[in-house]
Image: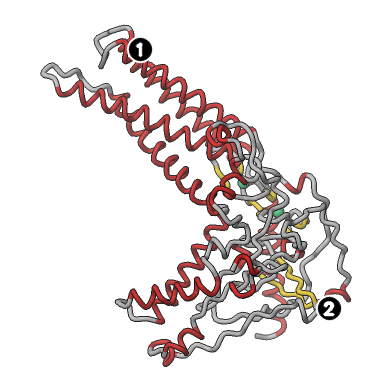
């Protein structure tokens, strides 16, 4: 490629990145962001209308009544109770922002390097763990294993600093256009270069001797120093992101402890409204199930007699809507409970899933497909060496399901079920797993504090 081609491509590429960043900085229009909130309210209003009519028919004993007035009253009272808590939780999650660090953190200047920086030395993607970018953006770690998040008074690095005092790695990010600069201190003690993996060759891949294959396919978590604050610079908001913060492109800003962007609540689910979101899907599942079961039960019962009344088409629509909505909320609720107990956000869990899939691929290469025992033994050996992916290997894991749960849902049992109270986290500071080093890299079991080994 000639130098003029390179310049031309460079200009085009730069313009493309600039256009992308401009788009990414802009949130979606208000009407697009809130559209699904209106849709959800309309859905709740319509299903409630049909259900109240269904109960009223029984209470006034008209020709459409499917059961006795007493049953109509009981159904209506239970329904009203569930509907009240659903609307209360929905109000809480819609009116509580997830927490936007750009609103209270000072902007810093930490521009992308103009000249391309040396690539981070990487080993084969096949054998490496996941990039920690996907898993856990985090902060500097003091010895107490909790991260103080002062407003980031990061000194603006001079050009000379960049070149002489540190080795900068320039790394793409999980969010396109969101670049990260990783500053690895020049101090040889703390600088950590990823262990080079032996090269893969076809001979030792397909007919691996136990020693060779275990060397090639060892578990290799990412060696990126993710607790170094420069790593968490957001190019769009120009802030050093607090740990676990991610930039949401729909909202056009960084979100504290980003879980996911939820169109149904009109913004992100993050640090301050995660609990209310869980409360909402919990009660929405229960309400949907109640409406579905009572209407279906009485419709089937009414059809069994000799003089069966015609089925109300609105009841069919109600059954379809509550089944769909209920199933969606129920799956969401179960997933959230599982993730909260592991202290993983949705976006972090994707990183662990990738790591697990990669490990399955490696096991499939090391052993014959039918040799499940050998695969299991290898995996146990890795778990013995490192601990489990997503638990001991999760920077935010607090050691027990209960502790993880309380960090989001709070200590008071009532708070687990009602949209009141708050979790134990403030969205800015998170206790870290002592199985990780000061820069946020997963260590082998032999390097853990002695009481944890
Ligand atoms: Zn941002
Ligand atoms: Zn969002």
295 left or right, relative to 246:
left
Per the image, the residue denoted by label 1 is 56
| Residue 174 found in image quarter | bottom right
Q: Secondary structure at mark 2?
A: helix
- State the image coordinates of residue 415 (x, y, percent, origin top left): 58, 34
171 left or right, relative to 111:
left
- State the image coordinates of residue 453 (x, y, percent, origin top left): 59, 69
| Crowd rating for badge 1 (residues with CA inside 10 Å; few <14, some 14–19, many 20+) | some
Q: Secondary structure at mark 1?
A: helix
* Farthest residue, direction left: 306
| Residue name at image x 47 percent, y 43 percent | 333
- State the image coordinates of residue 82 (x, y, percent, origin top left): 46, 25
Q: Nearer the viewer, residue 46 or 335?
A: 335
Task: Say if 95 sits above or below 241 in the image.
Answer: above
Task: Say if 98 sits above or below 60 in the image.
Answer: below
Per the image, the residue denoted by label 2 is 163
Q: CA distance from mark 2 to mark 1?
A: 77 Å
């Amino acid at each position: 490629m000639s130098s003029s081609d390179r310049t031309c491509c460079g200009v085009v590429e730069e313009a493309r990145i600039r256009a992308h960043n401009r788009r990414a900085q802009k949130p979606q229009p208000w009407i697009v962001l809130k559209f699904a909130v209106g849709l959800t309210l309309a859905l709740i209003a319509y299903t409630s209308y049909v259900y109240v009519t269904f109960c009223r028919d029984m209470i006034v004993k008209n020709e459409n009544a499917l059961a006795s007035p007493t049953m109509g009253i009981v159904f209506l009272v239970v329904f009203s109770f569930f509907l009240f808590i659903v609307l209360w939780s929905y109000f809480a999650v819609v009116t509580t922002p997830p927490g936007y660090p750009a609103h209270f953190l000072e902007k810093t200047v930490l521009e992308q390097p103009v000249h391309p920086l040396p690539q981070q030395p990487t080993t084969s993607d096949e054998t490496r763990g996941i990039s920690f970018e996907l898993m856990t953006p985090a902060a500097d770690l003091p010895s107490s294993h909790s991260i103080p998040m002062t407003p980031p008074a990061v000194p603006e690095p001079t050009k000379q600093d960049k070149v002489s005092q540190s080795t900068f790695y320039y790394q793409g990010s999980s969010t396109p256009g969101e670049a990260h600069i990783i500053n690895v201190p020049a101090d040889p003690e703390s600088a950590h270069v990823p262990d080079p993996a032996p090269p893969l060759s076809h001979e030792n891949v397909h007919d691996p001797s136990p020693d060779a294959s275990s060397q090639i396919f060892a578990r290799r978590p990412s060696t990126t120093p993710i607790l170094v604050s420069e790593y968490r610079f957001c190019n769009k908001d120009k802030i050093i992101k607090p740990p676990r913060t991610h930039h949401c492109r729909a909202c056009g800003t960084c979100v504290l402890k980003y879980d996911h962007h939820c169109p149904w609540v009109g913004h992100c689910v993050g640090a301050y409204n995660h609990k209310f979101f869980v409360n909402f899907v919990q009660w929405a599942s229960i309400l949907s199930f109640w409406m579905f079961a009572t209407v279906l039960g009485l419709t089937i019962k009414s059809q069994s007699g000799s003089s069966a009344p015609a089925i109300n088409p609105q009841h069919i629509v109600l059954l379809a809507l509550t089944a769909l909505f209920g199933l969606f909320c129920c799956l969401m609720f179960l997933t959230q409970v599982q993730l909260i107990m592991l202290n993983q956000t949705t976006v972090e869990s994707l990183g662990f899933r990738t790591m697990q899939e990669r490990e399955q691929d490696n096991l499939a290469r090391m052993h014959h497909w039918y040799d499940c025992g050998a695969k299991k033994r290898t995996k146990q050996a890795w778990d013995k060496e490192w601990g489990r992916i997503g638990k001991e290997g999760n920077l935010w894991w607090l050691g027990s399901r209960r502790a993880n749960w309380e960090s989001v849902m709070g200590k008071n049992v009532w708070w687990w079920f009602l949209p009141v109270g708050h979790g134990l986290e403030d969205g800015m500071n998170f206790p870290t797993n002592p199985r990780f080093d000061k820069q946020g890299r997963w260590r082998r079991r032999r390097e853990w504090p002695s009481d944890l080994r």
